[in-house]
Image: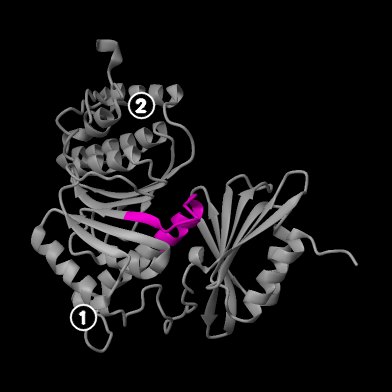
Amino acid sequence: MAQPTARDRFLALLQTSVHDGTLVKLTLGKHRGADASLKNIFVRPVALKTGQQLSFVYRHATRDITKNLPPAEALAIITHLIGSDFLDAHLFTPLQTAQLEIAKDGQARISIKTAASAPAAAPAAHDREREYLIPPDEPWLQALGITNDRAQPREGMSAKFRQINKFIELLSHLTAETTLPADRPFRIVDMGCGKGYLTFAAASYFGQRAEVLGIEARPELVAFCQGVVSDVRYNTLQFSAGTIAETALNRVDVLIALHACDTATDDAIAKGIAANAALIVVSPCCQKELRPQLTAPPILADALKHGIFQERQAEFVTDALRALLLEWAGYRTKVFEFISTEHTAKNLMIAAIKEHAPGSETTAQKIRDFARFYGIRSQKLASHLGVDLQPDQH
């Protein structure tokens, strides 16, 4: 009797996890299909009013497309995709993870690991009555003043609660795309974490898979957050007092810095690059450094006589330069809107995934050309990285 192939074994595990309700997540990678813009597919269970379904997120270079399908139809599609359009598949359940790798010649191998590297089961709800990735009955939400004693968002805090869940959804997708350690918990450092809303959320969502450290300059906030940690008994989370610029980081897999003001964002990015972080996620704020340097190209001079356009240009130039510098440092970058402007005007996010060695001369030249076009002579992140923006003038 013929032995089942690695692909057959993987599909059997997938089918079992769907039927017994233990599927947490399936990721498909190493795309080789006709649509060059498609990068990954992420699949997770959702509970709709019409019944249990599997939600597909098709991750393209510039957009995501979501489709919900009944389990039988979804399994048929996945079976077709594995080995044809995708050469890599990861299956996550609460008890184990399984990875199927298929070579271009069709040879396949499967590796299975125990629960130490498997994520906690993700909530499956999707409709109005759904459970969130961070459910409202988490005790730390009440301790931080987001929910009341009935596990409902307090007045004025509904947007913050949605923001927390949106961030964790985003972070779950980004970490799924990132090569993170499988033999130990990966380390998340949240720099300038403030009251720790997203720091607690990361620790809650990833559980024993991650060690989470929050860095905050205000000692009173650190003491408050450590008190909440003791109350909720999170043994994977801690907070430490310090500034972004002065904090030494020895080991970082995921670095987060949201709304770090002006060049503090550059300090955080530089810390992540120096620590060889696999994933860097920042949401810049108050981009002031370059505004005095910017020289309007002649064709833009009349438009940029308006202050609001000058401010927006400074924001664009600053963050575009940061994205280019991250690419020079070996990262694949994504720049996108995090949450709608009805919640905050500072809604840009830069995510960077480490993919190759730093120092591309082609990218360095693009950076110099960009800086020359806007009259930029110096910039904090470029200085941290040793990238000379104006070499011709030396």
User: Does label 2 or label 1 sit earlier along the sequence?
Assistant: 1
Look at 22% across and 33% down and name the residue there.
380
**For the residue marked with disc 1, what is the amino acid?**
Arg
**Residue 160: image location, x then y, percent:** 26, 69
**Picture colour scheme:** one colour
Look at 19% across and 33% down and name the residue there.
290
Where is 103 relative to 113, above or below? above
**For the residue marked with disc 2, what is the amino acid?**
Ile
Q: Mark 1 points at which residue?
A: 154
Q: Mark 2 points at which residue?
A: 367
Where is 290 relative to 272, above or below? above
Q: Is mark 2 on a helix, strand or loop?
A: helix
- The image quadrant that residue 379 belongs to is top left
Residue stretch rendered in magenta on the structure: 169-188
**Residue 205: image location, x then y, percent:** 39, 69
Measure the alpha-carbon separation of dots 2 and 1. Answer: 46 Å
- The image quadrant that residue 162 belongs to is bottom left
Where is 112 relative to 306, above or below? below
Does the magenta portion include 180?
yes
Residue closest to the far right: 1
